[in-house]
Image (spheres, helix red, strand yellow):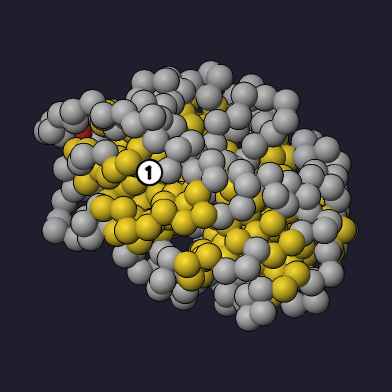
């Protein structure tokens, strides 16, 4: 995941959200009117609120078929935006002008200036994850049901010819390199398929551990890390040569996030409730960090100082200090499902699936603010630059 802030789907647990995020993935998200949001209160209750005319907007995906924009300057929700049925993953173009929401069989494009739908685009069968190239020109959709990847030209919102996958059946995660040259996609099987964006043609699949469920790419783009859930390994891939390195042993890894400086990859083992830091220079794992019993989502703040781990079953968000690799005091969020950060890293927004809210967290103090009502069953979330 990237899903920085995404939940990587697994086959043996309650699954709600396909990966989505900056790359995302990605994990792996009926119209309903959202509950009215109360204005942010002053004082401690308003922890996490922001000020200034350029504060970004958070977009929250509600499983009932809407996306709710939240003004992070005031922590108030705007009118819900109807999208294609069964929405899950969401990604925003690097310039912040458009959001793309992956539904059951279609992708919805949203103009972030007006918060209106500009297009509903047919993708493959059961799309699950999305990644947008750094130049914002193309959104790539991983289609679980049809074992294809659909490129969408964002200038026209027209889908291109689907890319057929032969070694990465039923893809659940997708990521793109920082230079925009290669998309990596994986699903069932034992391989990751690279796709050259210049030609939209798949290249030779790269063998990794069985059921590669999550992909994260280093900020410099030299290496990708792939979590093989069934193989109990994380496999580094040299993105220049597209060759796999020696697998790193990590118990049942299901999600990965990499610090902005590229020094450490944090690997989440959902059923073990552990996060393992991996030194990217040596590919050696450090001592695992206990974060709960069944944490399923993690994200790293843009400043790289903290990792936040979401545990849906225990109803907690646990911060990890990246300088010490020690877990802090868990914060209570009833059913945390997705996380995203403001670009300056001062606030994390955590969706609460059961409560129908999003909770702002002040990352300096790890203080949750007043939950913002956003709609029914919110999961995935993305914040516009």
Residue sitting at the far bottom = 198
Residue drawn 69% across the image and 34% down it: 10
Image x and y of residue 20, in percent: 52, 49
Instruction: Give 260 or 158, whichever is nearer the viewer.
Output: 158
Instruction: Give 169 or 254, whichever is nearer the viewer.
Output: 169
Instruction: Give 133 or 261, whichever is nearer the viewer.
Output: 133
Q: Callout 1: 10 Å neighbours few (<14), some, many (20+)? A: many
Quarter holding residue 43: top left
Residue drawn 79% across the image and 72% down it: 203
333 above or below 163? above
Does residue 50 appear anywhere in the picture? Answer: yes
Residue drawn 79% across the image and 36% down it: 251
Residue drawn 29% across the image and 32% down it: 374
Image x and y of residue 308, in percent: 50, 39
85 above or below 35? below
Image x and y of residue 369, in percent: 27, 31
366 above or below 278? above
Is residue 58 shown left or right of residue 227?
left
Does residue 291 appear anywhere in the picture? Answer: no
Image x and y of residue 37, in percent: 19, 30
Residue at the spot of label 1: 83
Q: How many marks?
A: 1
Is residue 40 shown left or right of residue 312?
left
Assign the C terminus to one quadrant of the image.
bottom left
SS assignment at label 1? loop
Instruction: Give 197 or 217, whichever is nearer the viewer.
Output: 197
């Amino acid at each position: 995941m990237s899903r920085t802030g995404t939940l990587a789907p697994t086959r043996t647990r309650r699954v709600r959200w396909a990966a989505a995020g900056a790359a995302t993935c990605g994990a792996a998200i009926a119209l309903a009117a959202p509950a009215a949001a109360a204005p942010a209160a002053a004082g401690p209750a308003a922890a996490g609120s922001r000020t200034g005319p350029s504060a970004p907007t958070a977009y929250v995906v509600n499983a009932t078929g809407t996306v709710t924009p939240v003004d992070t300057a005031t922590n108030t929700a705007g009118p819900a935006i109807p999208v294609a049925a069964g929405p899950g993953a969401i990604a925003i173009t690097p310039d912040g002008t458009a959001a793309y929401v992956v539904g059951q069989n279609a992708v919805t494009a949203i103009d972030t200036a007006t918060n209106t739908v500009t297009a509903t685009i047919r993708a493959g069968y059961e799309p699950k994850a999305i990644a947008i190239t750094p130049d914002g020109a193309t959104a790539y959709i991983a289609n679980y049901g049809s074992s294809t990847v659909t490129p969408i030209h964002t200038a026209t919102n027209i889908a291109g010819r689907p890319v057929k996958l032969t070694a990465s059946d039923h893809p659940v995660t997708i990521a793109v390199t920082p230079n925009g040259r290669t998309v990596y996609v994986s699903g069932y099987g034992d391989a990751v398929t690279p796709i050259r964006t210049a030609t939209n043609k798949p290249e030779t699949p790269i063998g990794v551990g069985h059921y590669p469920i999550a992909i994260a790419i280093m900020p410099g783009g030299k290496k990708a890390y792939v979590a093989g859930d069934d193989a109990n390994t994380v496999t580094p891939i040299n993105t220049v040569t597209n060759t796999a390195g020696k697998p790193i042993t990590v118990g049942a890894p299901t999600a990965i996030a990499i610090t902005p400086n590229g020094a450490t990859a944090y690997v989440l083992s959902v059923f073990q409730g552990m996060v393992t830091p991996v030194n990217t220079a040596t590919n050696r794992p450090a001592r695992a960090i206990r974060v709960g019993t069944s944490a399923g989502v993690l994200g790293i703040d843009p400043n790289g100082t903290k990792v936040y781990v979401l545990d849906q079953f225990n109803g907690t968000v646990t911060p990890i200090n990246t300088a010490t690799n020690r877990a802090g005091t868990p914060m209570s969020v009833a059913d945390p499902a997705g996380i995203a950060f403001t670009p300056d890293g001062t606030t994390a927004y955590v969706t609460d699936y059961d409560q129908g809210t999003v909770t702002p967290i002040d990352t300096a103090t790890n203080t949750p603010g007043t939950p913002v009502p956003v709609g029914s069953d919110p999961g995935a979330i993305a914040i516009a630059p």
